[in-house]
Every structure is written in structure tokens, then in C-alpha cells.
Image (spheres, grey):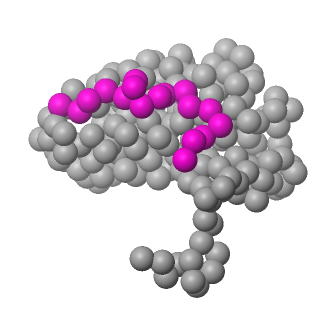
Amino acid sequence: MQYPQTALPDAEIPTAADPTHQHLLDTYASETNKTYSVWSSLPPEALTYRPHPKSSTVQEILSHQLLSERRFFGEFLGTPEPPPAEVLPSQQDPAAYAARLIELARPRLAHLASQPAAWWHAHVPFFDVERERIWVFWRRVLHTAHHRTQLTVYQRLRDQPVLPTYGPTADVTWDGADPTLTVEAAGRQ
């Protein structure tokens, strides 16, 4: 499947020191590319949108994603990170947030690639418990997917097209796309 925008092409994904952990780097790059695509498709006027008074605005979600990712990687995983005051982009525009997402991801990929298996499986503090680094990493990936999904719902509510992330959408499809909407399609072997 080809996505509308790829900021981290496969050729830029470093090789993991331990080949059994390459999937972590590939997944982080893929999820970052998906997030980049969604953020890049947001128009500037969407930043202040919130579907409900208790909901976050688009800009609050973008800021939270960058700041919380910095915290997860820096505090819990132990990657080198910029100071929190340097994380957010200077421009208040979805494209600037998307560009910053990629700027922050590249050095993380390089650091993660250099780690041996023991590093990934070491227990580290995570809020008020301890977890394996690999568990914290997957928790971060899921957290990112959650906020990206929030934004695609916001896009639908704003009557914007929703781009594909894991497959076709009602707005974007292609020959051979199979959304598996029937019992028959789900039963293919």
C-alpha cells in the first residue's frame, strides 16, 4: 500500500543492532509516516476545531502528541531528547507540527537502532510502575495511533476527506483494496 505522503522512506530506516528488533524501527517509522500524513492533510483553520466543549482542539492534540512522545522516549525509554521548551514548532500550522514530528523521529530511530536486545528488555520506571522498555515502546505506538484516530474523526466531522492509514477509507480506495466488510471476505484463506 502506498500512502499519500512518506516523510521517512524505507531507505532511511536504520538497521537494528539486533535483527530480531528491526520490526520496532520499521513500525515506529511506519506509524510516524501515517501520523505525518494525517497532520499534513489538516488545513490551518482546523487548529482551533473541537467537536465538543470537553474535547481537545486539534492544536492541543498535536502539541500533546509531540510533548508526550518526548516524555515517553526521554523519561521512560532513555533516548536523548531536546529540552521540552524546544519541542513545539515556532509556527502555529499543522504542516509545521508535521515537520517537527519527523525532525524528532529521525534521531530516535538512530538511537533505537543501536540498542542491543538486553536494552529493550530491561525494566524501567513507567509512571508509578516498572515495565520492560519494549512494552513502553509499544504503549507509545498505541498512544500515537489513538490520537491520530481522534484527528481522523475530527476530519470526518469537519467534512474533510479521511486519508488511508491501514487501508482504504470511504474517501480513498484503489483497485485491489479490500476493506473486509463481509463474512465471505473475512473467511478467505
Determine whether, in the image, residue 96 is placed left or right of residue 30. right
Q: Between 57 and 99, which is closer to the camera in this rendering?
A: 99
Q: Is residue 151 above or below residue 93?
A: below
Residue 76 image-quadrant placement: top left
Q: Residue at x 60, y 49 (%)?
A: 165
For residue 64, what is the image quadrant? top right
Residue at left 30%, top 37%? 77
Q: Residue furthest left?
A: 118
Q: Main secondary structure of the magenta part?
A: loop
In the picture, residue 66 is in which quadrant? top right
> In which quadrant of the rendered image does the C terminus lie?
bottom left
Which segment is the magenta one? Answer: 1-17
Point 74% across, 40% down: residue: 58
Q: Is any atom of residue 80 visible in this view? A: yes
Q: Position of residue 11 (x, y in %)?
A: 39, 26
Image-based side of 18 in relation to 9, left or right: left
